[in-house]
Image (tube, coloured by chain):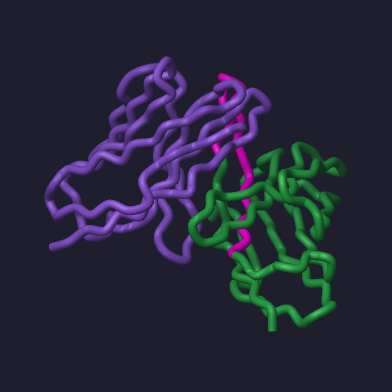
Chain colours: A green, B purple
Amino acid sequence: DGGITQSPKYLFRKEGQNVTLSCEQNLNHDAMYWYRQDPGQGLRLIYYSQIVNDFQKGDIAEGYSVSREKKESFPLTVTSAQKNPTAFYLCASSITLGTGASIQYFGAGTRLSVL
Amino acid sequence: GQNIDQPTEMTATEGAIVQINCTYQTSGFNGLFWYQQHAGEAPTFLSYNVLDGLEEKGRFSSFLSRSKGYSYLLLKELQMKDSASYLCAVMDSNYQLIWGAGTKLIIKP
């Protein structure tokens, strides 16, 4: 079964702690994305990567870091510098259409809370 | 700035038809997307419009007017399982998705 797997489903962070959210895809998609979703707001882009070993900051990258060492994997680290990390985190990968646009497909998400 | 507007919440009756509107102002346009998101779950892709007009896919249809910066999602023969949030997103000139806050659709028996 092809898809995007995020783990864990729920995660708790203590003050001053870094935590890493996993995202793996077996769709052979080149591009991958991390979004944050807060109640009453649209999805906000944290980081994205269009190719292995390369990634770009999105609109709200401060307090987060990523790596893209393999095509299949795009882990997100929420650092202690992120002062309001409580949110639903969504990972996506995309396939490019003939128009140049792309359709994004999402993992099941990780809900992060602060203890 | 870039902006996507859609109603916060709508209520409809099982078996009926509902239209969810989306207006947008973005830097460039490379397509408009609709996603469905059930509570606590991931968004799932419903439709993509890049040309003006209506795209029909089963009970769901999506319309686009680029000159008006306007789209709607039409859901027919509503079922209880259609209760979800519906997200409108526009791909801008940099091929980045700009997301609306979503419309929560409540279906009543």
The magenta segment? A88-103
Q: Is residue A14 left or right of residue B34?
A: right
Q: Residue at x 19, y 50 (%)?
A: B78
The part of the image, by quadrant, that contains residue B85 is: bottom left
Query: In which quadrant of the rendered image does the C terminus of chain A lie?
Result: bottom right
Q: Nearer the viewer, residue A95 or B38?
A: B38
**Residue A49 as seen in the image, left or right of residue A4:** right
Q: Across the whole image, how many numbered discs are drawn on residues?
A: 0
Q: Is A38 situated left or right of B50 in this image?
A: right
Tell me where residue B46 appears, x and y as whole percent. Answer: 40, 41
Residue A76 appears at what percent x and percent y?
A: 76, 59
Q: Main secondary structure of the magenta part?
A: strand
Q: Percent from the top left, x then y, of residue B80?
A: 22, 60
Q: Looking at the picture, tell me which residue is in the foreground, A97 or A16.
A: A16
Q: Is residue A72 magenta?
A: no
Residue ID at (73%, 44%): A58
Identify which residue is drawn at 30% across, 23% down: B54
A51 over B43 or under it: above or below: above
Image-quadrant location for residue B20: top left
A41 relative to B61, above or below: below
Position of residue B62 relative to residue B43, above or below, is above
Residue drawn where x is 75% and y is 54% of the image: A73
Q: Position of residue B50 (x, y in %)?
A: 46, 22
